[in-house]
Amino acid sequence: MPLQYSLDNVNFQAAKTFSGLTGGLKTVYVRDANPLGCNKSSTVAIPILTSLLVKEPSVAVGSNISRWSAAFNPIVFTYQRKDFAVTNANLNSVDGKAKLFVNTDTSAVKPGDIVYVDAGVYKGTFKVTAIGSNFVVIDAPYTSTAIGFININSLRPYYKVITEISYTDVYGQVKTLQSSNRPDGKGLVKTDLSNFLQSLLQVKDGSDYTRTNYRDNNLSASYQVKYAQQWDDAAGGAILSNWISIPQQYYVVYAAKQLGQQYGGNLAEYVPFTNGQPLAKWLTDFSEPVYSNNYPFDIGFIYSEQLLGLDIYLELTLLNINRKPLNGGAENVTLLNEDSSWLTNQDGSKLIIARPVTTAEPLLKQLGLNRLLVDATFPDDAYYFTIALKYEVASVPLAITQTQTVRIDKSADDQSVYLRWIGLSGSWNYYRFVYNQEVSLDVQNAVIIKNYVTDWENQDGIEDVISKAAGQKIKVMAQDLSVADIKGLQSIKYSPKVQMLTGKDPIKWQTIVINSATFSEYETFNGQAPFSLTFNLPSINIQTQ
């Protein structure tokens, strides 16, 4: 006859599996379907302890998960120490205290030991008043049964959690770093990996500005995490538990988020998701970046793991001075002569009567922080352009990023100083300063010695300069900038890396140092203000004697 199963000896079922159970002791009843058949019962313990890891730096955005973090914010993995399960609590008839049954041999625990308990109404630090082979009595009055966990230092002395991150370095070799952390009084172990992860990033650039989207492995990295518990045995040797690996990869970007920003140190608002909710922001410190024709320019974005396998493309649309799309079609339109030859301009180029307003360009499939290259000479009537990343499902375009507007700088290219710097968002920003710039030569730290004069008639001097330091300073200025531009430029003053363009063919950058004493003040009432900053060029290499 088929068997039936129950947990209350009243409601029986044919299936021998149960789901949705709470932890603790359970009595399982088994019987024949025949009323005259046999009956059997047995008590089993459902484990109460859950995963050691209770919190990690990922963030849920609707149905999406972002595992991208800013390297210069805390990146914390939190563990809850749970040494043993409390399977039940009964009244200790001797003194009316709570007797906690534990799923381990407790005979080594001594009265007077301090334990931490988290089981129903018994939550906190308690003194052990009595013990048995599988129970401890704590100095708390018995009020009800309970299940949970208990931490016992005398059974697991010098407890700690080891967190190991693994990553692939620039040479393709897998490297590991470990962090060991001990619990607080409640058994919480907090491991901040931000300092470790900052060492995976470096402030330098390998882009030659030839690829549509360049993956910047200097400013972003991926890593995996595993963790284990360790404590000492009675002989003082270390006992290491099995390693537990987190299957998902995590990502870190050379960024620093600020107080009050959404999602804390997580970059969820910049991570594209395939359902497009919400649309991802671009990695720029400007609300509206500025592009200059014939100058190197890119804008950062995150190519997330959700995009792998999709055909992502860039959609770029030219706008006029009123921020409306320019008149044009999907491609260049030209005129022909009667003999089918091209009608040309005076310089021999094709006469174009209509040009493409919106272009689409496929992107390379590269997981990580990418920098989208914009390398075009736009027409004179184009004052702005917009960019957005999209993919198609059944020929229907779906956006994954916000539409970012970029202003085209119309200032004359006269004595321009073109700067780039790594912003708080974790990618490069660009700005061109034009017109008159102040250049000064700064000589300082001269080391002078006085000579002893023996021949006042013929000696050539009383003092000699042994060494000195020299360098140039440049003060760049811009008039009537919008407050939005000034806010975008602010990050240049505290950026860890600022560079000036010194050559276009090939592209060459020179690192400069912003003078910390130059701070511009501005008023927001009129919406416009001047902006200036002073920076030091590399020191001049001069002779010493």
Image: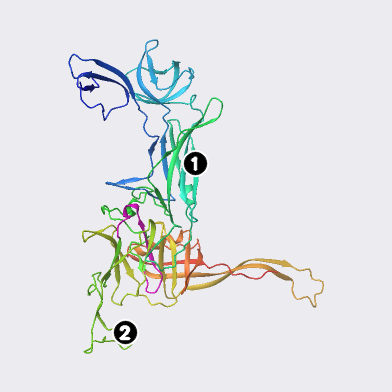
Residue 238 sits above or below residue 325 on the image: above
| SS type, badge 1 | strand
Is residue 299 rendered magenta in the image? yes
Q: Would residue 367 appear left or right of 386 to someone viewing this image? A: right
38 and 28: which is toward the camera: 38
- Report how many numbered discs are placed on residues in the image: 2
Asked whether residue 544 appears in the rendered view, the answer is yes
Q: Pick the quarter of the image with the C terminus.
A: bottom right
- Residue 179, labelled with which disc? 1
In the displayed orientation, state which residue is furthest to the top: 94
Amino acid marked by disc 2: Ser
Q: Position of residue 271 (x, y in %)?
A: 33, 53
Residue 134 sits above or below residue 337 on the image: above
Amino acid marked by disc 1: Ser
Q: Which residue is mark 2?
A: 349
Numbered range of the magenta stretch: 291-311
